[in-house]
Amino acid sequence: MTQAGYPDTYYFATANGLEEHPELTENLQADVCVIGGGYTGLSAALNLAERGYQVVLLEAERIGFGASGRNGGLIGSGQRKDVLEMEKAFGLETSRKFWDFAEDAKAEIRERVAKHDIQCDLQRGQLVGMHKKSYIGWARELSDALAERYDYPNTHALSQEETRALVNTPTFFEGFLDDDAAHLHPLNFALGLARAAREAGVRIFENSRVTAYTRTDPALVSTDKGSVKASFIVLGCNGYLGKLERKVAGKIMPINNFMIATEPLGEERARSVISKRIGVHDSRFVVNYFRMSEDHRLLFGGGENYRPSFPKDILNFVRPYMLKLFPQLSDVKVDYAWGGTLSVTVNRLPHLGRLEPNLFFGHGFSGHGVSTSVFAGKIMAEAISGTAERFDVFSSLPIHTFPGGTMLRYPGMVLGMLFFSMKDKL
Ligand SMILES: Cc1cc2nc3c(=O)[nH]c(=O)nc-3n(C[C@H](O)[C@H](O)[C@H](O)COP(=O)(O)OP(=O)(O)OC[C@H]3O[C@@H](n4cnc5c(N)ncnc54)[C@H](O)[C@@H]3O)c2cc1C
């Protein structure tokens, strides 16, 4: 951990607009108290302040300390489940609704970046590489479905040669290119949202962990040194929720995911690995994801664990995943290695809802949260300000409790995850 209270990541080393916010040491009143300073909380706070609400945001550590400041930065189109799976599970009409929501989520990110001039290296284009021969054909099927049923003509099925021309790994049999998906510097995006929220009037407090809140109207939200009396609470703690809200904790499973950043490769070598500045992930259940940074480092995410702690040597935990895809990088030094915690749901779709008329929550973005959490924050703000249409559709998604709830979810989940990661290898 750095002195500034952030993990020692490539993102922290290249952060811009880091601003210190005070700790809460008084008793305040507000219309809304937002708990959590990741994308969910920041987006809810910003959207509410723009609608004229008085907002206080309480973050236990620093803004973007959680997954929002540590992630791969990939902004995928659609939901975590592709539209073919969504259609099977919910039918075309519902699948289309959720596709449109995800398009709105991407648009919200683009608009925020432009409106607030957020310097977060937003780039377009994303490739999914198929790591199994048996997956050949999926890219064409999905691409056709998106063009025919979702008015989305921006994807292309690529042959093995075309895929390799973009990403120089021997491990992809086919590719799915989405010109309108994107990627960005995740911490700088979070810091930009925080600046926009401050400018809109949100009072932000860091190092202010919420210890409890009352289920009353108004509610009283307490930290060790202060409190906020508020008409509404928005809960955006995701994988870091802990025991703060037991009623929903069993719907999500915190899992840890890991990343490395290589030394700068130089533009030419970087382009020999990924020829355009697109984001990439593969088709594994435990997904490998990567892209080149602005200064030509490979930022690579791979491997996860399901324990309360990270592996001792994250660098050597992740590096073999990178070398399996890119053996040509065996001489390359790794400058940064870090982990982060996210939360997943049983069916990998986000869990949004309201526990009391004035207590909202959004979490469980299951590795697809860069855009979805920003959108969740926005539609919670809409719901609080009286337009709950999109929030109600989203919160109607069936999200099952993990078998065994919070007590026994780990053993079952670990077995499940191990099964799927074995399948990746077969
Ligand atoms: C390594 C990694 C890679 C990822 N890669 C991608 C990717 O490429 N694409 C993608 O779409 N998604 C990715 N994700 C997921 C994505 O980052 C998350 O879905 C998203 O950031 C969730 O935002 P959030 O605001 O809900 O949660 P977080 O960003 O985790 O924020 C929650 C915040 O709540 C605070 N908090 C918790 N408890 C309290 C309390 N009691 N009081 C006050 N504050 C509290 C925490 O300190 C934290 O800052 C990745 C996640 C990880 C960890």
Image (cartoon, rainbow, N blue to C red):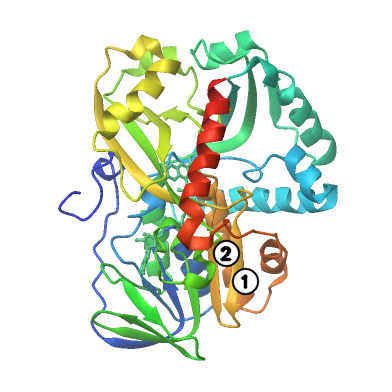
Q: Residue 263, located in which quarter of the rendered image?
A: top left
- Residue 260: x, y in percent? 33, 32
CB under 8 Å between discs 1 and 2: yes
Amino acid on which the number 2 mark rests in the picture: Lys
- Residue 421: x, y in percent? 52, 31
Residue labelled with disc 2: 378
**Horizontal arrangement in the rendering, residue 409 relative to residue 347 (left or right):** left
User: Which one is in front, 252 or 176?
Assistant: 252
User: Which one is in front, 399 or 296?
Assistant: 399
- Identify the element where label 2 is drawn: helix
Task: Estimate how packed mark 1 is, as few (under 14), some (14 to 19) or many (20 or more) residues with alpha carbons within 10 Å.
Answer: some
Up-down: is 380 above or below 122? below
User: Which one is in front, 377 or 7?
Assistant: 7
Up-down: is 387 above or below 98? below
Task: Estimate how packed mark 2 is, as few (under 14), some (14 to 19) or many (20 or more) residues with alpha carbons within 10 Å.
Answer: many
- Identify the element where label 1 is drawn: helix
Residue drawn 44% across the image and 73% down it: 34
Q: Residue 4, located in which quarter of the rendered image?
A: bottom left
Q: How many marks?
A: 2
